[in-house]
Structures are given as C-alpha cells and as structure tokens.
C-alpha cells in the first residue's frame, strides 16, 4: 500500500487565494469605473444607429422604387422614417412608418458648435427624402449632442452626420479639441 503525500495531491486554489484575487479585482474596478465616460459610448451608439437608419431608408427607396422620407423631430427626440408609396410627399395611414427614439440624454442639438469643414454643407437637416435611385433630395448635416454638453455649453459630446445629395450617404464626424474629425 502506497501513501500519498498531502502536498503532492494539491489541486485547485485555497479559499484565501480566491479571496485575495476578488479583493484585488474589486480595487481595480473601483479605480477604473469612474474614469469611463458612458455618455461618449451612448452618443457613438446613437450616431451609428441614426447612420444605420438613414442607410436603411436609402436601401428601402431603391428596392421599393418609391420615395422614403426621413424626418428629424428635435422636440420629441425622434427619427421618423415614412415609406411614401404614392410619392405625394405626405404620410397616409396605408403607408408604413418607423419611429426611432433617441436614448435618454441624447438630443438633436448643434449647441453653437462650429460648422463642418469645407466643402461640407452648413444647413441643418430636418427632412431628407431618399429618391428611387438612392440619392437624397438635399445635402446637409444632422447634429447630435448630449444633454450634458448642452447644459454645460461644452461641445465635447457633439457628433454630426453629413448627408451627401448625390449618393445619399451619411458620413460621421465627432468634435474633438475644437475641430471636427471625420469618422468615429
């Protein structure tokens, strides 16, 4: 009969070792969480969502071969996508409508931020009509800002989507160090 050594048969970790790991992870988390800027992540997500909805509206206009109207409602913080099946420019109850609500704390606000760099358009869009060929009826910009940025009069949270008339594409911008930077 062989006797096994207790020290050689050790598998796993002791309770004390696991508690030390949990304590160290807790300290690291307590130091890291206050440094995260959750509003920045929410604004980036909303900018991507709006860009996705604009692309969806453009593709819908091409595939259904009728106009699709996108309306930016600043007061209710909504993006409304109307399929204009009879191309009359108005919404009828027989036509489909999608309503996209912005996240809490996010608004369609320019808040005095500088215009996009030239040759970008300077007009702020409230309505975009995508035509059957995928083009937009006009060029312009949709601005997005946080309630925090508006109330503090800072523009660090400002985002913009530039709509190109010929292609209907949305290009993303963010406001960084007093200048617009293309892309996320």
Image: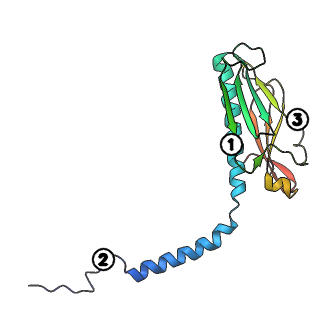
Residue 125: x, y in percent?
Answer: 84, 33
Between discs 1 and 2, the one toward the N terminus = 2
Q: Is residue 61 above or below residue 16?
A: above
Residue at image mark 2 = 11
Left or right? Give the position of 21 relative to 129: left
Residue 81: x, y in percent?
Answer: 71, 28
Left or right? Give the position of 18 relative to 12: right
Between discs 3 and 1, the one toward the N terminus = 1
Q: Between 35 and 83, which is closer to the camera in this rendering? A: 83
Q: Is residue 169 above or below residue 145?
A: above
Report helix, strand or loop for mark 2: loop
Which residue corresponds to the image point at 82% horizontal and 55% vertical from the top-left? 149
Disc sitting over residue 121 in the figure: 3
Residue at image mark 1 = 48
Disc sitting over residue 165 in the figure: none
- Of discs 3 and 1, which sits in the foreground? 1
Between discs 2 and 3, the one toward the N terminus = 2
Left or right? Give the position of 53 relative to 11: right
Residue 78: x, y in percent?
Answer: 74, 37
Q: How packed is label 3: few (under 14 Cα within 10 Å), some, or many (20 or more)? A: some
CB within 8 Å, label 2 to label 3: no
Q: Is residue 49 above or below residue 7?
A: above
Rounded to the nearest angstrom, the CA distance separating label 1 from label 2 is 48 Å
Which residue corresponds to the image point at 37% horizontal and 78% vertical from the top-left? 13
Rounded to the nearest angstrom, the CA distance separating label 2 from label 3 is 67 Å
Whether residue 156 can be seen here? no
Report helix, strand or loop for mark 3: loop
Residue 53: x, y in percent?
Answer: 68, 34
Whether residue 69 can be seen here? yes
Q: Could you say which quadrant of the image residue 61 lies in?
A: top right
């Amino acid at each position: 009969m062989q006797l096994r050594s207790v020290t050689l048969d050790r598998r796993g970790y002791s309770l004390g070792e696991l508690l030390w790991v949990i304590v160290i992870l807790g300290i690291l988390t307590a130091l890291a969480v206050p440094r995260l800027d959750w509003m920045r992540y929410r604004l980036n997500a909303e900018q991507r969502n709006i860009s996705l909805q604009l692309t969806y509206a453009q593709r819908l206009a091409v595939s259904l071969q009728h106009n699709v109207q996108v309306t930016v409602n600043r007061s209710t913080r909504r993006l409304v996508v109307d399929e204009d099946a009879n191309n009359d420019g108005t919404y009828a109850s027989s036509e489909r409508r999608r309503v996209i609500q912005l996240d809490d704390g996010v608004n369609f606000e320019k808040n005095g931020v500088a215009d996009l760099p030239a040759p970008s358009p300077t007009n702020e869009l409230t309505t975009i009509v995508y035509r059957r060929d995928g083009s937009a009826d006009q060029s312009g910009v949709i601005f997005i800002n946080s309630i925090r940025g508006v109330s503090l009069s800072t523009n660090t949270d400002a985002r913009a989507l530039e709509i190109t008339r010929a292609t209907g594409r949305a290009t993303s911008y963010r406001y960084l160090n007093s200048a617009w930077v293309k892309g996320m």
